[in-house]
């Protein structure tokens, strides 16, 4: 299921976007401990496509997508 979220991100001098935290609508904030991969990809379960960030958050791997100008996270495991 696709859920749009607010993200705190860093823009470096080369124009790269690096997400730092995921901020849920209910007030929860999760720090992104590590980004292990960045690539253009489709979300097969939730639909949509964009830049996919493979993020490590509290020892869990999540896919965070930047789709045009909105961020979403897929809460279902993709194959």
Image (spheres, rainbow, N blue to C red):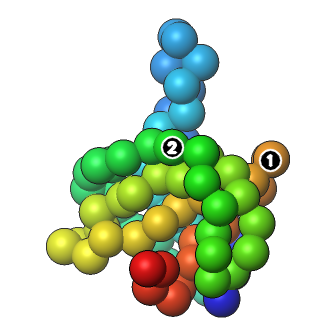
Q: Which residue is pictured at 68% across the width and 51% down the height?
A: 50
Of all residues, the one furthest to the front in this rendering is 79
Against 32, residue 4 (above or below) is: below
- Which badge, 2 or 1, is on the more N-terminal residue? 2
Q: Residue 41 at x, y = what percent?
A: 60, 54
- The mark lying in front, picked from 2 and 1, is 2
**Residue named by callout 2:** 39
Residue at the right extreme? 68
Residue at image position (40%, 57%) is 54
Relative image position of residue 59 (x, y in whole percent): 19, 73
Mark identifier at residue 69: 1
The quarter holding residue 48 reads bottom right
- Can you give x and y, in whole percent of width and height, for residue 29 in the image? 46, 70
The image quarter containing residue 58 is bottom left
**Image point 45% across, 43% down: which residue?**
38
Q: Is residue 41 visible?
A: yes
């Amino acid at each position: 299921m696709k859920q749009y979220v607010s993200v705190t991100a860093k823009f470096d001098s080369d124009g790269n976007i690096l997400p730092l935290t995921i901020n849920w609508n209910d007030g929860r904030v999760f720090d992104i401990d590590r980004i292990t991969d960045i690539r253009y990809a489709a979300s097969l379960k939730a639909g949509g496509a964009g830049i996919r960030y493979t993020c490590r958050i509290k020892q869990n791997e999540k896919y965070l997508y930047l789709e045009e100008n909105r961020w979403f996270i897929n809460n279902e495991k993709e194959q």
